[in-house]
Amino acid sequence: MDSIYLILGPESALAERALTKLQAELKDQKCEVTTLFAGDTIVGDIADALAPSLFSERRALIIRDLQDLPEDNRAEITRYIEAPDQLTTLIFVHKGGVKGKALIDAIKKVKPQIIACEALKKEAEKSDFVKTLFLDLGRKASPAAVAALVGALGNDLRELAGAVTQISADAPAGVIDEMMVDKFHQGRIETTGFDVADATLDGNLPAALIALRSALETGTDPVMITSAIASSLRSLAKVSGANRNQKSFELAGALGMAPWQIDKARRQLNRWNPGQIADAVGAIAMADAEVKGAASDPIYALEKAVTKIASSQFDR
């Protein structure tokens, strides 16, 4: 292992995964590991933890939330990294941003092993994250299963990682498919977002508004509802451009969807044209921004988007 690591970025799920892997390596090397939360340290804590071992044993120090380190304690780090102990592994975890930037710049000058943990915005990046998590746990998942997980929980990587861990533990041996993912979600709050999406895309406005109110009353985050509707619209867009003469199981791999998802989208497409899909995507994108803070009343913004999308199918 290198002697200094910097886990840097705002995506906590990626940071936790990186830290877990490093901790496993440290355990294999029989290191004595000390963990400090930077904001809780007082002068001398870091220097004491980094003092040379009397018995020449391998040790490691993990400093979490480095951005919260008191200014008085920073010199203990800058002095140490100028001449680090080769028997000690030092791991910094920093959430990114400008807080503590001077210290980060000083650490970067000694060329640590940097593990970037930037937020994942693209579906392909989230899908790769899920695939890697399954592989870390010794499991494989079908493209459709990965797509279903990302569609349901892609807005929260920590919850996505938790779902992968739980499914990997509960699913029988073999490749994890979308039916196993669907079984995992039975009874979970997040699935109600897809109930809203189904009624909305079916053009059933009364049912969509009832499902929306029910979902909100049972604790579903509005962001999960916009995510579910957006995911369903993406499925429509994908299937609309596919060859209608191809069977769903033949398209599944190329589209990253389960055959039943393709069949469902094809049924829904009977009520949609390309212009309406584009308008709906714009409406849900605006609603997503509004429920994340751009609107004074996010619930009203969500109801307005559901109403517009469900009603648009009749504006031909």
Image (spheres, helix red, strand yellow):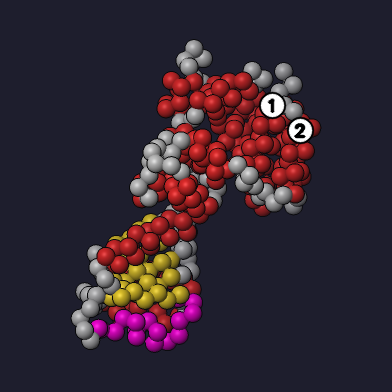
The amino acid marked with disc number 1 is Asp
Q: Amino acid at mark 2?
A: Ala
Whole-percent x and y of residue 40? 49, 79
Vertical placement of residue 290 versus 205, above or below: below
Outermost front residue: 172
Q: Nearer the viewer, residue 314 or 136?
A: 136
Position of residue 22 measured from the top left corner of the image (x, y, whole percent)? 33, 63
Q: Judge whether 296 appears above or below 184 on screen.
A: below
Quickly name the residue at label 1: 202
The quadrant in which the C terminus is found is top right
Q: Is residue 45 within the magenta segment?
A: yes
| Residue that numbered label 2 is attached to | 207
Q: Is residue 233 magenta?
A: no
**What percent of the width, then of the height, locates residue 144?**
47, 33
Q: Residue at x 72, y 26 (%)?
A: 203
Query: Residue, x 74% and y 28% (percent of image)?
Result: 204
Element carrying mark 1? loop
Residue 230's place in the image compared with 113, above or below, is above
Residues under labels 1 and 2: Cα distance? Answer: 10 Å
- Mark 1 surroundings: few (<14), some (14-19) or many (≥20) residues within 10 A: many
Look at the image and tell me in which quarter the N terminus lies: bottom left
Q: Which image quadrant for residue 88? A: bottom left
Left or right: 59 as drawn, with respect to 269: left
**Looking at the image, do the residues carrying marks 1 and 2 touch, with CB atoms under 8 Å apart?**
yes
Observer-nearest of 292 and 45:
45
Q: Residue at x 74, y 52 (%)?
A: 296
Question: Residue sitting at 51 percent across and 14 percent down?
Answer: 244
Q: Which residues are magenta?
A: 38-53
The front one of 83 and 262 is: 262
Q: Which is more toward the observer, 158 or 315?
A: 158
Single out the residue that lies furthest toward the right: 206
Secondary structure of the residue carrying tag 2 is helix
